[in-house]
Structures are given as structure tokens and as C-alpha cells.
Image (cartoon, helix red, strand yellow):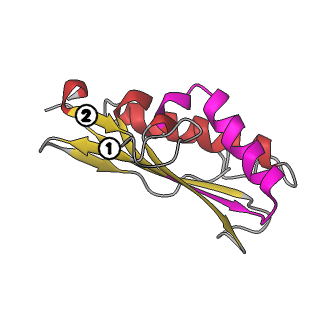
């Protein structure tokens, strides 16, 4: 499947900080991950008041979920990152932390980073939603 994924940045659109404006996937199987939260294996919140720690945990959880279906960061075709903040510095910190993580390659695809008012768990600051193209 990896050779069926094409990433495009049209010259007429603005430069991006690492993601692509368009990701094209030839017909095939896809996996839609539920929003990955900053919870450890026991269900405890990781990194209260620490967006970077939460970003590392959601990256680790997403990597585990991808591996469970035979996929990796290179198979991700869409990401949506939710951060409880309206401060550019906090949003950038989460983006940079995710890109520096073992999941980093996933964010070279079509990506959206959103500042939001609230997420599902008390103290939760980061959530990650991924779609991946699976091998046939």
C-alpha cells in the first residue's frame, strides 16, 4: 500500500510546516483510529498540565494502535490534532513534540491542528485522530 499513497503540495498554495495539502490513496483498506487520549495502559491521565507530555503519550498510544493493524507512521494519510489552548506557543509545542516523536512521519501527510475549548477527560489537553491506509 505504501506505493499507493501520494502526497502533494500544489505550487499555487502556501508552504506548510511539514505536512502536505493533499494525500491521495488508491482504493484499498483503511483504518480509522478513535481519538487517542493521553492515558496510560491502566487508564490514568498522563501529564496533567503538560501538553508536551500528553502529546508524547498520545503518539505512543497511536503507534500501538497502528501496529495492532499492521501499520506504521508512514501509512497515516490524515491526522487531526486537538489541543486545549488558543495560544500559538502551546499549539506549536504540541506540533513539534508530535513531529519529534517516533510517530513523527505520520504528520507529513494531510494534517490539521486545532485549538479547542475542552476534550473528553478532566485534565486532558491533547487528542489525536488518525486515518491510515492498510496493506492489501
Residue in the picture at 79% in, 49% down = 51
Sort mark 1 into few (<14), some (14-19) or many (20+) by Cα contacts within 10 Å. Answer: some
Along the line of sight, the residue nearer the viewer: 1 or 92: 92
Left or right of residue 63: residue 74: left
Please check the rendered image and state whether residue 32 is part of the magenta-colored stretch, yes or no.
no
Residue 81: where, in percent of width, then height?
Answer: 58, 54
SS at mark 1? strand
Magenta stretch, residue numbers = 80-106
How many marks on residues? 2
Left or right of residue 60: residue 53: right
Task: Kindly indicate whether the residue at mark 2 contacts the one at mark 1 (C-beta within 8 angstroms).
Answer: yes
SS at mark 2? strand
Residue 96: where, in percent of width, then height?
Answer: 70, 37
Residue 25: where, in percent of width, then height?
Answer: 22, 42
Against 8, residue 105 (above or below) is above
Residue 136 sits in quarter: top left
Q: Say the numbered circle drawn on residue 5.
A: 2
Circle 1 residue:
23
Against 80, residue 25 (above or below) is above
Residue in the picture at 20% in, 29% down = 1
Amino acid at each position: 500500500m505504501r506505493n499507493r499513497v501520494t502526497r502533494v503540495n500544489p505550487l499555487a498554495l502556501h508552504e506548510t510546516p511539514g505536512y502536505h495539502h493533499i494525500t491521495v490513496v488508491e482504493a484499498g483498506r483503511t483504518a480509522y483510529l478513535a481519538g487517542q487520549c493521553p492515558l496510560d495502559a491502566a487508564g490514568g491521565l498522563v501529564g496533567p498540565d503538560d501538553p508536551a507530555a500528553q502529546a508524547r503519550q498520545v503518539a505512543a498510544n497511536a503507534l500501538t494502535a497502528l501496529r495492532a493493524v499492521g501499520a506504521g507512521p508512514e501509512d497515516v494519510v490524515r491526522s487531526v490534532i486537538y489541543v486545549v489552548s488558543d495560544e500559538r506557543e502551546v499549539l506549536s509545542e504540541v506540533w513539534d513534540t508530535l513531529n519529534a516523536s517516533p510517530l513523527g512521519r505520520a504528520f507529513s501527510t494531510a494534517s490539521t491542528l486545532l485549538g479547542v475549548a475542552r476534550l473528553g477527560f478532566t485534565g486532558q489537553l491533547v487528542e489525536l485522530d488518525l486515518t491510515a491506509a492498510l496493506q492489501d
